[in-house]
Image (cartoon, helix red, strand yellow):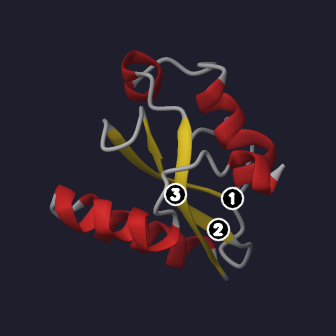
C-alpha cells in the first residue's frame, strides 16, 4: 500500500482487500488500501505509481471486500496472495461473473 511518508494508518480505520486484472482471466494483482474508491484504484487506473500494475496494465477492479480494520484487510490480502490462481478466479467469479470493472460502482 502506498502512502505519504508522514501519513499513519490507524489500526481501527476500515480497510479494503481488492483484486485488479488486466482483462478477463488476465494478469491479477491483489492489494490492500484504506481508500479504495477515491485514491488507490485511481492510482492504478492512471498508472501514477510505477510497478507491477502499471507494467502489466492491471487496472480493472474486479473484486473487493471491506474490512472493519486495516489489520483484518491486510491479513485477508496476505491470505489471498498465497492462494492458487484458480481460487482467486473463483473468488472473482462469485462476486463478478462478468469481470466488469467495478470501479464506477464505488466512485
- Residue 77 position in % (x across, y down): 41, 64
Nearer-N-terminus badge (1/3): 3
> Is 99 located above or below residue 80 in the figure?
above
Q: Nearer the viewer, residue 39 or 22?
A: 22
Q: Which residue has dot 2 on it?
A: 15
Q: x and y percent of residue 68 in the render?
A: 67, 83
Residue in the picture at 47% in, 67% down: 74
Give percent across and percent down for residue 5.
Answer: 67, 35
Please say if the residues under marks 3 and 2 sit with CB atoms less than 8 Å apart. no
Few, some or many C-alpha atoms within 10 Å of disc 3 (few <14, some 14-19, many ≥20)? many
Of 67 and 87, nearer the camera is 87
- For marks 2 and 1 on the same chain, the one whose residue lies earlier in the sequence: 2
Query: Could you tell me which residue is drawn at 84 percent across and 49 percent down?
Result: 107
Do the CB atoms of the residues marked 2 and 1 lie less than 8 Å apart? yes
C-alpha gap between disc 3 and disc 2: 10 Å
**Quarter where residue 8 is shown:** bottom right
Asked whether, in this view, residue 63 is left or right of residue 16, the answer is: left
Please tell me the numbered disc located at residue 34. 1
The numbered dot on residue 18 is: 3
Give the CA separation, mark 1 to mark 3. Answer: 11 Å
Say which quarter of the image contains residue 13: bottom right
With respect to residue 45, does 72 lie above or below? below
Instruction: Measure the alpha-carbon separation of dots 2 and 1.
Output: 4 Å
Q: From the viewer's perspective, is the residue at label 3 or at label 2 nearer? A: 3
Instruction: Out of 62 and 82, give the one closest to the viewer.
Output: 62
Amino acid at each position: 500500500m502506498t502512502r505519504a511518508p508522514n501519513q499513519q494508518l490507524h489500526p481501527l480505520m476500515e480497510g479494503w482487500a481488492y483484486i485488479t486484472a488486466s482483462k478477463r482471466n488476465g494478469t491479477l494483482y491483489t492489494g490492500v488500501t484504506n481508500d479504495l474508491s477515491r485514491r488507490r484504484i485511481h492510482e492504478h487506473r492512471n498508472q501514477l505509481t510505477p510497478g507491477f500494475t502499471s507494467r502489466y496494465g492491471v487496472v480493472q477492479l474486479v473484486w473487493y471486500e471491506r474490512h472493519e480494520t486495516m489489520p483484518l484487510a491486510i491479513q485477508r490480502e496476505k491470505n489471498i496472495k498465497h492462494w492458487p490462481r484458480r481460487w482467486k478466479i473463483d473468488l472473482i467469479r462469485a462476486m463478478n461473473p462478468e469481470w466488469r470493472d467495478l470501479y464506477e460502482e464505488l466512485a
